[in-house]
Image (cartoon, grey):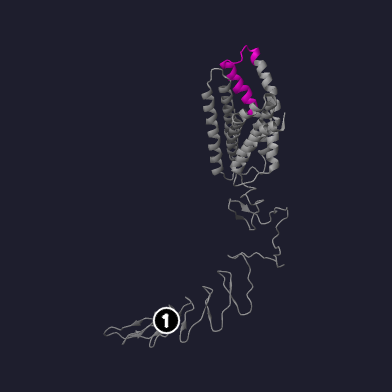
């Protein structure tokens, strides 16, 4: 087989794989994992060929003639499609089910496509080696998109099964849908092509329907990609690893409780009092701000905000708000509200409310309320010393 024919057999699978992987925006899967998926998918062609040969002999022994509807139905659905899709499915489960990189829903689509295209590439090389370049061109627009469609559907429901398992729910339903849907698509395509009475137009319509389903499902899965595990490795495509923030049993953005002495990405435990970049130990404070401030000489410490305030010369310090106030000339200072009041000429100052009141002509001044009282006719005003 010439080098051109080999490139022709491999190129369609590479282009489809690049398209599927390129739609992944939220995570990055290691290249080594994708390569092993493709290799294991290609290796699954060996048992598939053996089982197909045994299946043909079994059907011949049962008296079914090749080309009839019953023979092609059994052969396409329950021999060829069943064993080929089973090999892809089992290989994908072995490599990815417990893999830590399987943390996004779109990862399942990538894994299914890698396994399917690995199988399709080796199968296509064998067909091109036997049938020539013309057959390779024909399979590039028929069989390769078929296997990619099966991989997309299989991977989509496979990721749903993994998400259910991570949430403590049953995964068997989506696992069965993942395998049976891929087997059904593959069997339908082979059956339409194998029956003698099938028209070419029907074959083209089935193929176009499968390709349209493939692209729609890729677009939908990429658009709705989300985290399906509790401890994701990839948070966005530019983070090499998810590194938890330092905190004391505080929930992060995914609802996890972050323990204080967890190992970081390098396997080191984050100690309680670690030195910062300036060589000073960062102590933890149970206050609201979380940092310990050392007030210097003459400074006042604000318990609410955790910041140290430096009152300037002549200022009064407000204990409640934590701010220093500068009373102007002739003003009175209210310790409770922290506001300065300027009593005008003839006004009395109320120490409790902080407001100045102007008693009118003939009124008596009440020291407790700060308001001027007007004794009515016949009343006498009793002054009580406060």
Per the picture, the main secondary structure of the magenta-coloured stretch is: helix
Name which residue lies at 56% across and 25% down.
Answer: 188
Quadrant housing residue 309: bottom right
Q: How many marks?
A: 1
Please say whether residue 69 is one of the residues in the magenta stretch: yes
Q: Percent x, y for residue 300?
A: 58, 76
Name which residue lies at 53% across and 34% down.
Answer: 212
Characterize the local packing of mark 1: few (<14), some (14-19) or many (20 or more) Cα atoms within 10 angstroms.
Answer: many
Name which residue lies at 61% across and 43% down.
Answer: 22
Q: Percent x, y for residue 311?
A: 56, 79
Quadrant housing residue 63: top right
Decide if residue 169 is in sight here. Answer: no
Q: Percent x, y for residue 3?
A: 72, 33
Identify whether 336 is placed above or below 153: below
Name which residue lies at 63% across and 65% down.
Answer: 285
Taking the view exactly as shown, the residue that stands out farthest to the left is 377
Decide if residue 6 is in sight here. Answer: yes
Q: Nearer the viewer, residue 353 or 61?
A: 61
Part of the protein shown in magenta: 59-85
Q: Percent x, y for residue 10?
A: 67, 34
Quadrant housing residue 368: bottom left
Q: Nearer the viewer, residue 232 or 308?
A: 232
Q: In the picture provided, is 381 more to the left or to the right than 77?
A: left
Residue placed under numbered mark 1 in the picture: 350
């Amino acid at each position: 087989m010439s080098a051109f024919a080999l490139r022709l057999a491999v190129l369609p699978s590479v282009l489809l794989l690049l398209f599927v992987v390129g739609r992944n925006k939220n995570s990055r899967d290691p290249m080594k994992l994708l390569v092993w998926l493709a290799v294991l998918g290609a290796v699954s062609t060996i048992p598939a060929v053996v089982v197909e040969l045994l299946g043909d002999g079994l059907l011949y022994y049962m008296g079914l003639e090749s080309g009839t509807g019953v023979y092609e139905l059994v052969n396409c659905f329950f021999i060829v499609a069943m064993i080929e899709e089973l090999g892809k499915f089992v290989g994908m489960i072995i490599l990815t089910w417990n893999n830590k990189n399987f943390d996004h829903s779109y990862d399942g689509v990538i894994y299914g496509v890698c396994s399917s295209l690995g199988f399709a590439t080796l199968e296509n090389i064998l067909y091109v080696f036997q049938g020539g370049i013309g057959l390779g061109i024909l399979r590039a627009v028929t069989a390769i998109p078929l296997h990619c469609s099966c991989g997309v559907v299989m991977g989509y429901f496979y990721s749903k099964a993994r998400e259910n398992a991570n949430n403590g729910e049953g995964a068997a339903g989506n696992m069965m849908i993942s395998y049976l849907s891929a087997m059904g698509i593959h069997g339908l395509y082979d059956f339409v092509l194998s029956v003698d009475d099938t028209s070419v137009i029907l074959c083209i319509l089935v193929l176009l329907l499968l390709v349209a389903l493939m692209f729609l499902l890729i677009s939908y899965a990429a658009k709705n990609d989300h985290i399906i595990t509790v401890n994701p490795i990839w948070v966005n495509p530019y983070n090499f690893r998810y590194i938890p923030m330092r905190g004391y049993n505080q929930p992060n953005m995914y609802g996890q409780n972050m323990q204080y002495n967890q190992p970081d990405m390098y396997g080191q435990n984050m100690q309680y009092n670690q030195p910062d970049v300036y060589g000073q130990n960062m102590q933890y404070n149970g206050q609201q701000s979380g940092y310990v401030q050392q007030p210097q000489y003459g400074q006042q410490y604000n318990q609410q905000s955790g910041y140290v305030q430096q009152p300037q010369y002549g200022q009064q310090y407000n204990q409640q708000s934590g701010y220093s106030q500068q009373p102007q000339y002739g003003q009175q200072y209210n310790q409770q509200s922290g506001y300065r009041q300027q009593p005008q000429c003839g006004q009395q100052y109320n120490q409790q409310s902080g407001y100045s009141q102007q008693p009118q002509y003939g009124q008596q001044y009440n020291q407790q309320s700060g308001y001027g009282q007007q004794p009515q006719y016949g009343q006498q005003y009793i002054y009580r010393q406060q």
